Amino acid sequence: MTRRGAAGRRAGAGAIGLAALLGLTLGACSQSNTPEEYNTLTQQNFLESCTNFYFDNTDDTLGITENTVTDDTVVAPPDQNTCQCMYEAFAGPEGSDAPEPMPINSTVAKTPEYSGYTGPNFTDLNADLKSNPDDAWNSVPQNFKDDINACSKSGGSGTTTTTAGGSTTTTAGDTTTTS
């Protein structure tokens, strides 16, 4: 077996693992609580599913608790910083006036600021990850995959800025990538 073959399988397994994690994370948005906007509740649902810990929401400030969501399905969930970084890959950094990198739903996806965007919206990606995670992950634009991978590799210390036009700057550790 060549090194390239083994590395390709590891990369493929990593992508499938991230897709499964995102399926669990975005899966927190059931039909009854499908988000209409990126807000504290959307962030709380994402972080709870990603970290496997419940969060308290006090005056739109989230605080992690010691209570786990489930104790038997998530073996080694990412930490809060990594999950927050992943959330920001979709929603954009907190306090930013720029449009969210990924539109929250199909209505928002039709607005002028997303005219050049061709990937899935957050709520459709959620539904697709539940039914066919491989195809759903493959539909995600590469810049989002790169941002999420940077979050995983940096332990959440990566910062990501993505514009609706597709330009992305990701800083993970000492490495900055613009695409």
Image (cartoon, rainbow, N blue to C red):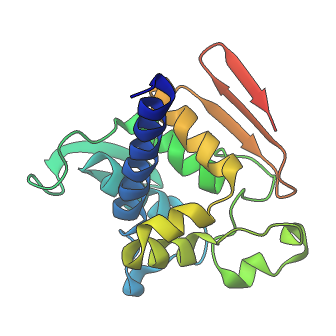
Quarter of the figure that contains the N terminus: top left
Note whether 26 is above or below 158 in the view shown.
Answer: below
Q: Quadrant of residue 141?
A: bottom right
Question: In the image, residue 151 lies at what x, y percent?
Answer: 52, 35
Question: In the image, residue 13 lies at what x, y percent?
Answer: 38, 45
Residue positioned most to the top: 174
Question: In the image, residue 126 lies at what x, y percent?
Answer: 47, 72
Q: Is residue 57 left or right of residue 144?
A: left
Counting every numbered tag in the picture gives 0
Q: Nearer the viewer, residue 35 or 133?
A: 133
Quarter of the figure that contains the C terminus: top right
Q: Quadrant of residue 73?
A: bottom left
- Residue appearing at x 84%, y 69% in the figure: 114
- Residue appearing at x 62%, y 61% in the figure: 140
**Residue 38 in sight here:** no
Q: Nearer the viewer, residue 168 or 53?
A: 168
- Residue appearing at x 18%, y 57% in the figure: 69
Q: Nearer the viewer, residue 139 or 11?
A: 11
Q: Is residue 54 left or right of residue 125?
A: left
**Residue 176 in sight here:** yes
Note whether 28 is above or below 15 in the view shown.
Answer: below
- Residue appearing at x 35%, y 68% in the figure: 28
Note whether 113 is above or below 154 in the view shown.
Answer: below
Note whether 31 is above or below 70 in the view shown.
Answer: below
Question: In the image, residue 52 lies at what x, y percent?
Answer: 24, 50
Q: Is residue 33 left or right of residue 167?
A: left
Q: Nearer the viewer, residue 60 or 54?
A: 54
